[in-house]
Amino acid sequence: EDQVTQSPEALRLQEGESSSLNCSYTVSGLRGLFWYRQDPGKGPEFLFTLYSAGEEKEKERLKATLTKKESFLHITAPKPEDSATYLCPRARNSGGSNYKLTFGKGTLLTVNP
Amino acid sequence: EAGVAQSPRYKIIEKRQSVAFWCNPISGHATLYWYQQILGQGPKLLIQFQNNGVVDDSQLPKDRFSAERLKGVDSTLKIQPAKLEDSAVYLCASSSSRAYGYTFGSGTRLTVV
């Protein structure tokens, strides 16, 4: 079964306390691993796409890495505005050149001031 | 660049009633997706369009859900009749290429009572 598992389900940090979120996937044939953040009452917002093991991407305090079986989102010196649910869907082909994203439950990150 | 527009923002209906949601994707995005997000869960793909053709509707409950994308631009998602378990946020997304992921709208929050 095509699964994306994120851990932890919830994470509470103090401002400035660095940490990492984990995303593991169980089905081969990865066609891209994405990271999104979702604020309450809003749709998910695109952060990164990773395609191959060893790839890394950064944006402000966030750094995403990818291995053969999992991806990590490292958050360095987080601020309260980084509080959100972080989702890491994987891409699979859905016919021709099309792809679809399969989401897990996400990690709810809360950063306290 | 204008984002993905969805309406209405909120909808409350009684079970067995019908409801329709509207989505206007980003101009030029050929691929359009409808996702269902139940509280506390990640988004679940309902249907994917490429222009005005259906690419994947394997998880669409076809006995009660229908969707169309006339002229390959706007799309509507309909539920008839609604059940209590259809209470969720319905997200529309569009995409131009895998590298940039999807762009999601803010969603329609449906409550079935």
Image: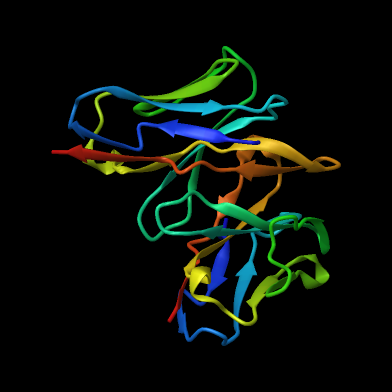
Find residue B64 and report its horizontal and vertical position in percent. 68, 75
Q: Residue at point 51% right, 77% down?
A: B8
Find residue A60 and report its horizontal and vertical position in percent. 37, 29
Dividing the picture into quadrants, the one containing residue A83 is top left
Which image quadrant: the N terminus of chain A? Answer: top right
Q: Establish if B68 lies above or below A79.
A: below
Find residue A107 and report its horizontal and vertical position in percent. 38, 38
Q: Establish if B102 lies above or below B84.
A: above
Q: Establish if A100 lies above or below A31.
A: below
Q: Residue at point 56% right, 38% down?
A: A89
**How many numbered dots are placed on residues in this image?**
0
Query: In the picture provided, is B38 more to the left or to the right than A98?
Result: left
Decide if residue B57 is in sight here: yes
Q: Residue at point 43% right, 41% down?
A: A106
Q: Residue lying at the far left in this picture: please name it.
A: A113
Decide if residue A57 is in sight here: no
Find residue B9 and report its horizontal and vertical position in percent. 46, 74
Q: Residue at point 57% right, 19% down?
A: A69
Query: In the picture provided, is B83 more to the left or to the right than A17?
Result: right
Dividing the picture into quadrants, the one containing residue A110 is top left
Which image quadrant: the C terminus of chain A? Answer: top left
Q: Establish if B9 lies above or below A69.
A: below
**Colour scheme in the image?**
rainbow
> Looking at the image, which is closer to me, B103 or B65?
B65
